[in-house]
Image (cartoon, helix red, strand yellow):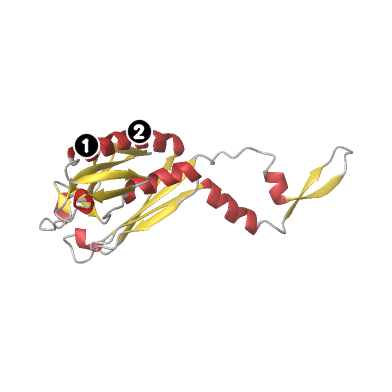
Amino acid sequence: MATLKAQVFDLEFSYYDLNNCDEIEYSLAILFNGKPLFNPSILAKANYAIIEDKFKITDCYEEDWLHLFFHNILKTKKGSSYETMEVPTWKFQAITWEEKKEEKQKSQINKTVKVLNENGEIVDLPYNEFNSMFPSLFEEDIEFIITLPHEIFDISEYSTLKLSFQTNFFNLVEFLEEFQKEMDDFYERHRDRIKYLGEGAYRSKADFD
């Protein structure tokens, strides 16, 4: 199990199993102050996508997409998104400061701020240039958004639910170190069925026969 810390939330991800179609199945638990976020009574108990209050997520034949999703955020410092094709449909999205900064800069293109120059004169300085003089307090922040499918709930009033979590690159690095160990153990456990090819790709051993 690998834990992504997000303030008072813990997002626990794990490689759960390899199904009959050689698709990786992940598990996800969402904890609030150390306890499950959702009351078990509202979860669809008969749903195959729920295992002991954890969610099972499948949609990655020949691609270890969840590991790739997180790794690309760290590699590019930019956000990413992925939506599963299989029902129930999950969506994972990450938004980093780089993206928010680009959007903010576009909105401030024609804005200026009055400042005092070295000659003691008040001049108009482009807003973006003014902001670049100060280090950002948010450049390490990551907004992580999970859209949960309505099928996991046992109550008809519940529909697709979107949750937003605030984390940062320090937490992401720690998480990926744990997730890498999970990944190595998983491929070793199933070495007789699948082979990891690198860059998030894997193949069924049957394809090599």
Give the image location of residue 206, x and y in percent: 18, 52
Give the image location of residue 25, x and y in percent: 21, 50
- Label 1 vs 2, first from the N-terminus: 2
- Residue sitting at 44 percent across and 48 percent down? 143
Q: What element carries label 2?
A: helix
**Any part of residue 182 in sight:** yes
**Any part of residue 29 in sight:** no
* Separation of marks 1 and 2 at Cα, in angstroms: 17 Å
Q: Compare residues 46 and 77 and report the one nearer the observer.
A: 77
Rendered image quadrant of residue 14: top left
- Residue sitting at 17 percent across and 46 percent down? 193
With 160 as the anchor, is 75 left or right in this view? right
Give the image location of residue 54, x and y in percent: 19, 47
Report which residue position mark 1 lands on: 188
Q: What element carries label 1?
A: helix
Report which residue position mark 2 lands on: 177
Which mark's residue is nearer the viewer, 1 or 2?
Answer: 1
Q: Compare residues 209 and 120 and report the one nearer the observer.
A: 209
Query: Which quadrant holds the N terminus?
Result: top left
In the rendered structure, which amino acid carries the disc numbered 2? Glu
With 31 as the anchor, is 124 left or right in this view? right
In the rendered structure, which amino acid carries the disc numbered 1? Glu
- The numbered disc on residue 171 is none
